[in-house]
Image: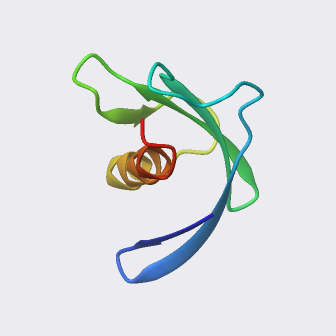
Amino acid sequence: MRITYKDADYVYEILNSTAINKTTTKLHIGFSGHDIILIKDEKNVWIQEAGGFMVEPELAQALGRSVSLRFRM
């Protein structure tokens, strides 16, 4: 899938092994050659799980929103 963030285009891949639906709170995403895990917090905001390759918090939220809109979460 594609996303534009701060006037730059990125391609990412959803790597979840289970179906994505309204109850999904964890996303496994391939982004720029790295695997990142996004978690929906208690405020329904997508944040990145600590450890490994880190992206900006706003980019993590944008990625989560992109998936949420695509799969009508």
**In the image shown, does 19 or 28 lie closer to the viewer?**
19
Q: Nearer the viewer, residue 65 or 36?
A: 65
Residue visible at 43% across and 47% down in the picture = 60
**Farthest-out residue, bottom:** 7
- Considering only vertical position in the picture, is 18 above or below 64? above
In the rendered view, does 65 fall on the left or right side of 27?
left
Looking at the image, residue 61 lies above or below residue 38: below
Q: Is residue 1 left or right of residue 7?
A: right
Residue 27: which quarter of the image? top right
Q: Quadrant of the N terminus?
A: bottom right
> Residue 50: x percent and y percent?
51, 27
Quadrant position of the C terminus in the picture: top left
Q: Residue at x 51, y 44 (%)?
A: 71
State the residue at coordinates (38%, 54%): 62
Q: Is residue 21 above or below residue 12?
A: above
- Residue furthest to the left in view is 43
Which coloring applies here? rainbow
Q: Quadrant of residue 22?
A: top left
Residue 15 location, x and y as percent? 74, 40
Tally of numbered tags: 0
Q: Is 7 displayed left or right of 71 in the figure?
A: left
Q: Position of residue 61 (x, y in %)?
A: 36, 46
Query: Which residue is painted at 37% across and 35% down in the image?
Result: 46
- Expressed as whole percent of the image width and height from the top left, the position of residue 26 reads 54, 25
